[in-house]
Image (cartoon, helix red, strand yellow):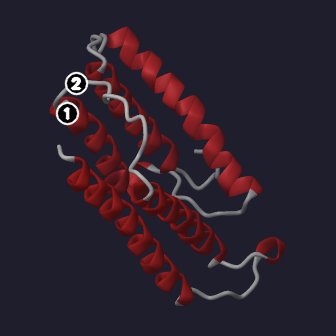
Amino acid sequence: MSAPLQIRLQTALGSGALLVSALLAWGATGISSEAGYAGVGPNFLPWVVAGALALCGGFLVYEALTGGWRHLEEPSGAAQGDWVAFAWVSAGVLQVATLITVLGFVLSCTLCFMLAVRGLRGAEGKPAGGPRQLVLDFVTGFLIAGPAYWLFTKLLAINLPGLTQTGWL
């Protein structure tokens, strides 16, 4: 790839980040700024993300216009994406969106973890594992999702869908 084309593409990428930042900031203006917990309103995080993205986009444009991204290394990994691994990880994310109100937060996140780990193992060229690995993945996912659910519902008082009305699952 020629140097001028590479610099134009790098500048376009940085400009795209700035555009997304501007859209986020515009969207944040429509969110209420009424102070909530600890004096922080619901529009605080969108503004932080928009600001951080603007800084990154500005830095990318600056770097591109002052000589391009220097010392680029050859990217690691395969020449093509692993579509099977992508499908496993995507299935995990999509099932959470579909089943969280049916299975509850803990079980749907546990299932998401199981599917995503299977896909990531496949992307590394490792075997997915048998029944023992499936149980281990379930236990690991449950041990991550359970405390996360408890922290959100009990400590932060954020309502997440549960499987039971007890507030523990």
Find residue 13 and report its horizontal and vertical position in percent: 33, 60
The 10 Å Cα crowd at callout 1, few under 14, some 14 to 19, many 20 or more, is few
- 105 sits to left or right of 76: right
Q: Residue at x 41, y 65 (%)?
A: 17
Horizontal side of 154 relative to 165 (left or right) equals right
Quadrant including the C terminus: top right
Q: Is residue 1 found left or right of 139 in the rendered image?
A: left
Residue sitting at x 27%, y 60%: 8
Report the residue at 57% width, 72% height from top: 46
Asked whether disc 1 touches disc 2, contact meaning CB atoms under 8 Å apart, the reply is yes
Alpha carbon separation for disc pair 1 and 2: 7 Å
Q: Residue at x 44, y 22 (%)?
A: 137
Q: Residues within 10 Å of mark 2 (few under 14, many from 20)?
A: few
Q: Position of residue 159 (x, y in %)?
A: 61, 63
Q: Nearer the viewer, residue 4 or 124?
A: 4
- Which circle marks residue 81 in the picture? 1
Task: Tell me the amino acid under the disc marked 1.
Answer: Gly
Name above or below for residue 158 compared with residue 112: below
**Which residue does the numbered mark 2 point to in the structure image?**
78
Q: Is residue 39 above or below residue 60?
A: below
Q: Amino acid at mark 2?
A: Ala
